[in-house]
Image (tube, rainbow, N blue to C red):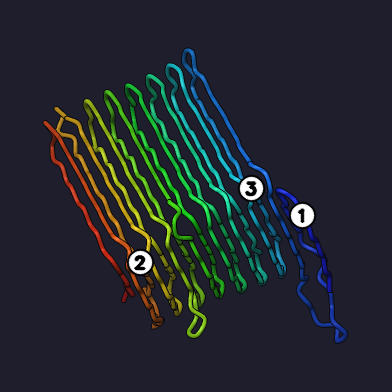
Amino acid sequence: MLKTSLKLLGAAATVALLTSPALADEDGEYQAPLSIVVIDQVQLNDVWSDMEVEIPGYAADAVSTSTAVGNAAAGLVTSGDIDLDVYQTLNANVGAENRITGYAAGTVVGTTTAYGNSTTGGTWAGDNYYRADQVSNGDVSASTTSDIEGAYQIATSTTAIANVSVPSDEYGTNRAFQYQESNGSVIAETDVEMCCDGKSATFTTTAGANAVSSTGLTSTNFNGAVQIAAEGETVQSYSDVYMNDGHDVLVASTGFGNSATVHNQYGYATLGRDGSELYQQNGTDVDAQTYVTLDHWSGYASATAYGVGNSALISNSVSDTGLFANQDNSGQVYSQAQFNGQSTVEGTGIVSATSIGNAATATLCNTCGDAVLQGGVNQINSGQVIARGQAYVTNSGGVYGSATAVGNSATFQSTGH
């Protein structure tokens, strides 16, 4: 049996393990290769990235990326089994800033990402034994500013998350467990001021304390997590967009305390198990706000804000699916979406603000089988949940507004024949 052992202490570590030769046991039978990886990281000083792209005249394309990560670890193999254990501690602040300024460009893309701790691990045609322990004791921030005259199409993405864990598996078995603890504040901001776009303008802003995202294809997928976001801290996602003339404009702000998601296809999948449930405790205040002002627009214009204390989501196709979760939210969840503008060409305006204390959703697409959903969810919410929406439109083809506030939400849904 092939074994690879690695233990690293530092700011960033990445392990990419290629396929090792197949080995045989004493009886001559095939034995899948196994890679064993241990990564231990402690970050003690601030991490900061800053990028500015200036366009004094015209550019066909303008792309600006700013990324800051306190601790980054990855264990990935092209085939065979992997046993990955990662331990990450952040005792510092992490910040990423991104600015795009100037006159005009054909296509403008801005991506700003700040993570306190980040771990990813997986394999193809093998089994993934995955554990990530992440503690973030600092503040994490990401900021994107766009101040240009115009662009044919423009898209910016701003993301700040304290702890991120991403296990994956294809054509094998995924056994993943995460412990995540966030003890700092997180803020993501997008600020846009421009004249016009010709095709589309999309601006997304996301802030969160703890995030788990697991994927599987033709795999058996077991996932567990303990996620804790401390009281007295804040998670804020903020978007402010002004345009003189916009076409097909989408602005979205998302804020969450704890989020655990599993997306699987073709194979048993579960998030938590009976007696070993997913545990989410959020004491952090969550604030998602979106402000959009368009002197004039055509097509559609959308301003949305979504805030949630704890979120558990699993989706699967054809095979049995489970969701077992205990959720406790004591932080305030606040969302506000505001839209001002006019459209003399009958454009459509959409305003949506949604706040949820605890949300749990299990979805099974059962198009050609008799697979079943199973699970149990316990939810306690003691935090205020507030959603506010405002729309002021002088002329338009239609304006649609929605404000939704929910303390606890649990949904199990099976679709198909």
Dot 2, crowdedness within 10 Å: few (<14), some or many (≥20)?
A: many
Q: Which mark is residue 70?
A: 3
Answer left or right for 193 relative to 118.
Answer: left
Residues 154 and 43: in front is 43
Give the distance between the C-alpha atoms of the residues marked 2 and 1, in whole angstroms: 36 Å
Q: Earlier in the sequence, mark 2 or mark 3?
A: 3
Outermost residue toward the top?
57
The three-letter code of the residue at mark 1 reads Leu
The three-letter code of the residue at mark 3 reads Gly
Q: Quadrant of the N terminus?
A: bottom right
Q: Quadrant of the C terminus?
A: bottom left
Dot 1, crowdedness within 10 Å: few (<14), some or many (≥20)?
A: some
Dot 3, crowdedness within 10 Å: few (<14), some or many (≥20)?
A: many
Image point (46%, 21%), residue name: 101
Task: Please state the horizontal and vertical placement of residue 214, each as a whole percent of the image.
Answer: 53, 64
Answer left or right for 246 relative to 203.
Answer: left
Residue 415 seen in this snapshot: no
Which residue matches tag 2? 358
Q: Earlier in the sequence, mark 3 or mark 1?
A: 1
Q: Earlier in the sequence, mark 2 or mark 1?
A: 1
Q: Which mark is residue 9?
A: 1
Circle 1 SS class: loop
Relative height, residue 321 to residue 12 (above, below): below
Image point (78%, 56%), residue name: 8
Residue 190 seen in this snapshot: yes
Residues 294 and 126: in front is 294
Relative height, residue 86 to residue 223 (above, below): above
Task: Please state the horizontal and vertical placement of residue 287, each as a whole percent of the image.
Answer: 36, 50
